[in-house]
Image (cartoon, grey):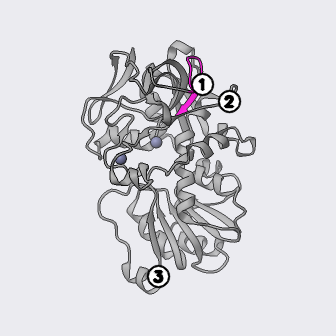
Amino acid sequence: MRALVLQSPGRLELTDVPRPSPAHDQLLVRTEAALVCTSDINDVRRNPFGIRLPVVIGHEAAGTVAAVGRDVRGFSPGDRVATHPVHPCGRCDSCRAGMGHLCSAMEHFGVNMQGTFAEHYVARSDRARIVPRGLDWPVAALAEPVSVCLEALAQARVEAADRLLVIGDGPFGVLIARLASRLDLAKVVIAGRHDFRLGFARGAVPVNVRKLGEKARAALRAESVRPSSYDAVVLAAGTREAASEGPALLRPKGRLVVFSAVPGSTPIDLFDVHVRELEIVGACNDQDRLDEAVKLLGDDSLRLGELITHRLPLREYREAFRLAEQAREEAMKVAIMPEEHGAGR
Ligand SMILES: [Zn+2]
Ligand SMILES: [Zn+2]
C-alpha cells in the first residue's frame, strides 16, 4: 500500500510499505481522511521527540473498518470509525492511576506504531469509536484534536462568568475557543497573528497582536474587562513570547494552561507566580475524552466542518504540508484522503 514515510528530518517520501495486519485486539482501518497536525510538521522539520526513523507519520484519522482481530468485540468490517492515536499500556503506574494519557510505555500512531498517512492503518479497538453515517470523514478525523482541546479546557477549570484568553490562532487555538464558546463564560478572547484564522473562532473576541504590535498587551487587558484579569489563559502557540506574556495577563490565582509544546527554555517570571499565586498547569493528550469528543463531532452548532479548508489526495502530500505549514491566510485544517477513494479539493 502507499504510505507517507519520514525517512529522516526533512525527507518525507510517498512509498510502498506492507499493509499491516491487525493483531488480536486491533482493527485494520481503511484510511478515509487523515489530517495534517502541527506536530507532524514539527516531526518532519526536526523530529523534536526523537522518533525512531523511518516511520509512517500521521495520527489524526478516521476510516472504514476493513478487518478485525480475533478478540475484537463490537466492531465489524464496514463500520465507520474515528480513532485516537494514544495507546496506553494499561500496566504502568500512570495507567493504573487512571492516567493512561501519561503512560510511560504508550504506543502512538506515527511514533512507535505505523501512522495514518497511509491507505490503511491498525488501531487497538478500545481506541476506536463508531461515528454516525453521514459524518464528513475529515470531521470524524477531528476526534483526537477535539479530545485534547476538551482536556485543555478542563485543565483551565473555567466556570460560567469566567474570562478566558486563548493565545494562538492555529487549528488548536481556534478549536479551544470554539469549544469554550459553549461554556457560557463571561468572555472568550483569542489572540493571534492572522485575521483569516482568527475569523474561524466563532463566539470569541479576536485580537490580532501582530497588527497591534506594542499595543497588544493593553488591548488584551482591556478585553478582559478588568485590567490584567483573565481567570485562565490557554497557551496554544509554541513561542517563548506567548509563554511569557500569558502569566502577565492572569488575575491573582489565575491559571496558565500550557497546551503547546514550547521548545527550549522559557522565560516565565516566577516572582510573579509567587506573589500573585498563579498556577501553571500542563495539558498533553487527554484523559478519556474520546466519547465526549465523538459526540461533539456531529453537533451542528459547532460546525466543525468549517475548519477543514483543504482536501488533497495522498499523492499531493507536499502541497498538503505546504498549506498546513505556510498558508496561514488561506488554510486551517488540511485533510489528506487516499486517492483510491477519489478525493478532490
Ligand atoms: Zn495532532
Ligand atoms: Zn501505561
Image coordinates of residue 47 in percent, x first then y, are: 29, 42
Q: Is mark 2 within 8 Å of ligand 1?
A: no
Disc 2 marks which amino acid?
Pro
Residue at x 55% of width, y 72% of height:
215
Q: Quadrant of residue 153?
A: bottom right
Which disc is residue 277 wearing? 3
Q: Is residue 206 above or below residue 247?
A: above
Q: Measure how far apart labels 3 and 1 are at the Cα level.
A: 47 Å
Residue at x 44% of width, y 29% of height:
123
Disc 3 marks which amino acid?
Glu
Q: Residues within 10 Å of mark 1 (few under 14, many from 20)?
A: many
Residue at x 60% of width, y 43% of height:
291
Q: Residues within 10 Å of mark 2 (few under 14, many from 20)?
A: some
Q: Please state the extent of the stretch shown in magenta in the rendering.
A: 74-83
Q: Which residue is mark 1?
A: 80
Image coordinates of residue 187 in percent, x first then y, are: 68, 67
Prevalent SS, magenta region: loop
Q: Measure how far apart labels 1 and 2 are at the Cα level.
A: 7 Å
Quadrant in which the N terminus appears: top left
Pick whichever of labels 1 and 2 is earlier in the sequence: 1
Q: Measure how far apart labels 3 and 2 are at the Cα level.
A: 45 Å
Which disc is residue 132 wearing? 2
Q: Quadrant of residue 42?
A: top left
| 1 lies left or right of 190 | left
Is residue 169 visible in the rendered structure shown here? Answer: no
Pick whichever of labels 3 and 1 is earlier in the sequence: 1
Secondary-structure class at tag 1: strand
In the picture as drawn, the residue positioned furthest to the right comes out as 301
Pick whichever of labels 3 and 2 is earlier in the sequence: 2
Q: Quadrant of residue 203?
A: bottom right
